């Protein structure tokens, strides 16, 4: 007899998908089998609405060792026999339900993805989105998420080196919590999450299994929050101290060359970890759930297979190596239990003692139906893009007052109140930490090189034009790396969107991927890993379409890293990317200024990727040649905000002497792309001019570093202390209401 719609809703399968399961099996599934299908055919695990789009991303480069979809994370060759492993993932829905544990276990999960490759985690970043802090619920979510990240991350010995925090009404009740982790491993010691050898043991290590997280992948992460019901049991609970021990035990076992494979137990728990390993290895498996250590009595096979209890890993071990493996885990006082074996059958056989509770073809579980995503451009979007920004009156505030207002807005203001809660110096490799540069930089131990990490993404721009917004997200993430002195090497991403079955969201998702693809090709960076988080909406409203980008770059000489703040009195300040400061109203499109001064989100963002490529190349060459004292991306808040931030971070004033053509609000606060504010000694100007000419990169002189005031002739004249106070305390004051 077919299952009820209520049961299908519980595991986020449609009636049509259930009928497909029955047709493929030739029978109705047993309860455990249905739960396994629900998990692996969920949006979170099966990528039903995104897999075909993701194939558009460029993913082949000589330095790429492991590309997207092949393992738990992407892998880049960084020389000297070393490899960088990195990935970004979302934990949005769990964080909306239980923000502290949702964010904490998001950190734990991304760390285990890196660990599963045999790599030591060396850096964390996060990208967060919340509703306005004027709302008490949003303040609670904000404080709890940050608390969860610090509460977990600070205990596991991995530095949190940077990130970003944005605020907008569309994220109210549905925060975005994206976590990135970078690991380092010897390239010849990379591990695969593949069960290739029949007879190998499947060994479960780490925490005991409980009921937390059941239906997390299928029920919580693969649908909207329309249902007013208790979701808290679907959120996992973390134990960071056990995670730290688990990291060390797994790495020691890998170093001893005792593992055939290693896999994280994340979304869908035992079901996804075991089935995915068998699918990659072209094998089958047999598991006895009665052998799984449990922390709760009376758990059913269904609950054991779908539990998402944290701090668990699956080891694939040759029988003759098990005793040595167990000895290592006993030393670390960590449970280590064989629960099954690899078989040659291509079938997943699940036992409970002697009773068979599921028997399914592995490849049937890992091949859900895939859906085309296209959608249509809505009429309201065309109207927003065509909005006549030239007809807007100038802001009522003076340029100086508007600058202070922007600097203190939570999205632009200093995030020190957030990152001071994170340990960013543990492991002693951090050379540019949060708040010091546009990207974080860590040294590659044992070499003269460094790795840079940046996260970026602007949902407001993607809302107005998802294609341009997707391209801008890639460009700005790479631009941030360049400003720190790193050559962009690879991209990871989180695609955070609403319900893909809605034409609007389908349009946004497809266009954003196309824009990202275009930018990756122009900038010659591959997408090597990532995550898709759909159904991010509550009460009928989707979040802004938000592709969050994590970018990895390389510095051949880590001593050539470049900060954002001005460094020396008398340095000349130059803007790369344009020949004059133009007050073009079109650059107000989607800007922080437009929303703050006019309460308006409108216009059509744009980017010239050819210009972007030239600007990044010129800036990177200038840093590598030692010409620049500082470099800072011109983005949120526009030119005046970028200049002010460089002055604040360097503790040095600025005297601007450039003419403003056109609207002063657009000239100072418009968010035109492909611009970088740099400072350098007067004597280095001729070489910079020659270099810019070689790269066909326009530039314009802006003024001079020095003094205790921040001034732009004819527009702004403020004490440095005043703009410093507005910027440093804006977020803290908003969050303490």
Image: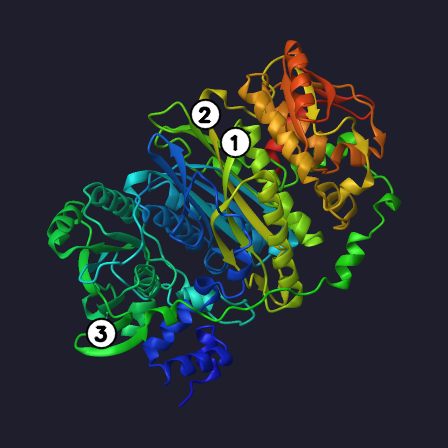
Please identify the residue farthest to the top as the structure is shown. 683
Q: Residue 683 appears in which quarter of the rendering?
A: top right
Callouts 2 and 1 close, C-beta under 8 Å: yes
Above or below 524: residue 532: below
Q: Give the labeled residue for mark 1.
A: 487
Q: Is residue 233 above or below residue 563?
A: below
Report the residue at 30% width, 56% height from top.
Answer: 194
Q: In which quarter of the image is residue 682?
A: top right
State which quarter of the image contains the C terminus: top right
Residue at 44% in and 52% down: 100
Residue at the location (55% across, 69% down)?
371
Quadrant placement of the N terminus: bottom left
- The CA distance from mark 1 to mark 3 is 51 Å
Colouring scheme applied when the structure was drawn? rainbow
Mark 2 vs mark 3, CA separation in Å: 53 Å
- Mark 3 crowdedness (10 Å alpha carbons): few <14, some 14-19, many ≥20: some
- Mark 2 element type: loop
User: Which residue is tagged 2?
Assistant: 556
Q: Please, is residue 187 above or below residue 100 in the view?
A: above
- Where residue 573 appears, as percent x and y from the top left, is 68, 19
Determine the CA span between mark 2 and mark 1: 9 Å
Q: Nearer the viewer, mark 2 or mark 3?
A: 2
Q: Find disc 3 in the rendering and name its residue.
A: 351
Few, some or many C-alpha atoms within 10 Å of disc 1 (few <14, some 14-19, many ≥20)? many
> Would you say 345 lies left or right of 216 here?
left
Q: Position of residue 321 (x, y in %)?
A: 13, 51
Res. 541 in view: yes
Q: Relative to 354, is 214 above or below? A: above
Circles 2 and 3, Cβ within 8 Å, touching? The answer is no
Q: How crowded is mark 2: few (under 14 residues within 10 Å), some or many (20 or more)?
A: some
Could you say which disc has been placed on residue 450 in the image? none
């Amino acid at each position: 007899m077919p299952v009820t719609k209520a049961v299908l809703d519980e595991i986020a399968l449609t009636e049509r998908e259930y009928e497909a399961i029955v047709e493929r099996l030739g029978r109705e599934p047993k309860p455990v089998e249905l739960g396994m299908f629900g998990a692996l055919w969920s949006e979170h695990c099966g990528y039903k609405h995104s897999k075909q789009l993701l194939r558009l991303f460029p993913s082949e480069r000589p330095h790429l060792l492991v590309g997207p979809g092949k393992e738990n994370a992407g892998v880049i060759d960084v020389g000297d026999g070393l490899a960088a492993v990195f990935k970004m993932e979302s934990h949005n829905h769990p964080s909306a339900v239980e923000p502290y544990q949702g964010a904490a276990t998001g950190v734990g999960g991304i760390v285990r993805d890196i660990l599963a490759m045999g790599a030591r985690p060396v850096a964390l970043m996060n990208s967060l989105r919340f509703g306005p802090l004027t709302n008490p619920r949003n303040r609670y979510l904000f404080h709890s998420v940050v608390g969860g990240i610090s509460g977990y991350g600070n205990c596991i010995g991995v530095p949190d080196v940077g990130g970003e925090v944005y605020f907008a009404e569309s994220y109210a009740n549905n925060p975005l919590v994206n976590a990135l982790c970078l690991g380092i491993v010897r390239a010849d010691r990379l591990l695969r999450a593949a069960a290739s050898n029949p007879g190998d043991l499947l060994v479960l290590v780490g925490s005991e299994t409980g009921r937390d997280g059941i239906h997390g992948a299928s029920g919580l992460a693969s649908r909207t929050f329309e249902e007013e019901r208790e979701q808290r049991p679907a959120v996992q609970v973390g134990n960071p101290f056990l995670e730290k021990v688990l990291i060390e035990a797994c790495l020691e076992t890998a170093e001893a060359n005792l593992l055939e494979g290693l896999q994280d137990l994340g979304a869908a728990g035992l079901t996804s970890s075991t089935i995915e390993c068998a699918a990659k290895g072209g094998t089958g498996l047999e598991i006895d759930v009665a052998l799984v250590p449990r922390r709760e009595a009376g758990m059913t096979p269904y609950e054991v297979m779908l539990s998402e209890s944290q701090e668990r890993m699956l080891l694939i071990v040759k029988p003759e190596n098990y005793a040595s493996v167990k000895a290592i885990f006993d030393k670390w006082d960590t449970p280590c239990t064989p629960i099954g074996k690899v078989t040659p059958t291509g079938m997943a056989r699940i036992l409970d003692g002697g009773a068979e509770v599921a028997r399914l073809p592995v490849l049937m579980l890992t091949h859900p139906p895939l859906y085309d995503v296209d959608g249509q451009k809505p009429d309201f979007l065309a109207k927003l893009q065509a909005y006549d920004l030239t007809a807007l009156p100038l802001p009522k505030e003076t340029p100086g007052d508007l600058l202070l207002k922007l600097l203190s807005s939570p999205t632009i203001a200093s995030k020190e109140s957030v990152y001071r809660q994170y340990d960013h110096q543990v492991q002693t490799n951090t050379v540019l930490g949060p708040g010091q540069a546009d990207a974080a930089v860590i040294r590659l131990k044992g070499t003269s090189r460094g790795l840079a990490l940046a996260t970026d993404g602007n949902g407001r721009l993607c809302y107005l034009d998802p294609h341009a917004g997707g391209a801008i997200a890639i460009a700005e993430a790479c631009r941030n790396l360049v400003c720190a002195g790193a050559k962009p090497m690879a991209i990871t991403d989180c695609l955070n969107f609403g319900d893909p079955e809605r034409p609007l969201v389908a349009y946004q998702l497809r266009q954003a991927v196309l824009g990202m693809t275009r930018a990756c090709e122009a900038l010659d960076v591959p997408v090597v890993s990532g995550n898709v988080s759909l159904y991010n909406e509550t009460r009928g409203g989707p979040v802004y379409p938000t592709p969050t980008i994590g970018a990895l770059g390389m510095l051949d000489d880590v001593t050539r890293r470049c900060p954002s703040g001005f460094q020396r009195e008398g340095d000349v300040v130059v803007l790369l990317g344009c020949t004059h400061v133009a007050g073009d109203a079109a650059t107000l499109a989607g800007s922080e200024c437009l929303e703050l001064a006019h309460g308006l989100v409108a216009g059509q963002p744009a980017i010239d990727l050819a210009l972007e490529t030239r600007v990044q190349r010129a800036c990177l060459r200038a840093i590598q040649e030692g010409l620049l004292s500082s470099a800072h991306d011109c983005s949120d808040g526009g030119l005046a905000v970028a200049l002010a931030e460089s002055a604040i971070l360097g503790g040095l004033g600025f005297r601007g002497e450039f003419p403003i053509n056109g609207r002063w609000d657009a000239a100072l606060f418009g968010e035109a792309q492909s611009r970088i504010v740099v400072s350098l000694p007067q004597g280095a100007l001729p070489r910079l001019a020659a270099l810019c000419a070689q790269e066909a990169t326009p530039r314009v002189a802006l003024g001079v570093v020095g003094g205790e005031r921040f001034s732009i002739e004819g527009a702004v004249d403020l004490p440095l202390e005043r703009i410093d106070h507005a910027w440093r305390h804006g977020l803290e004051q908003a969050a303490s209401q």
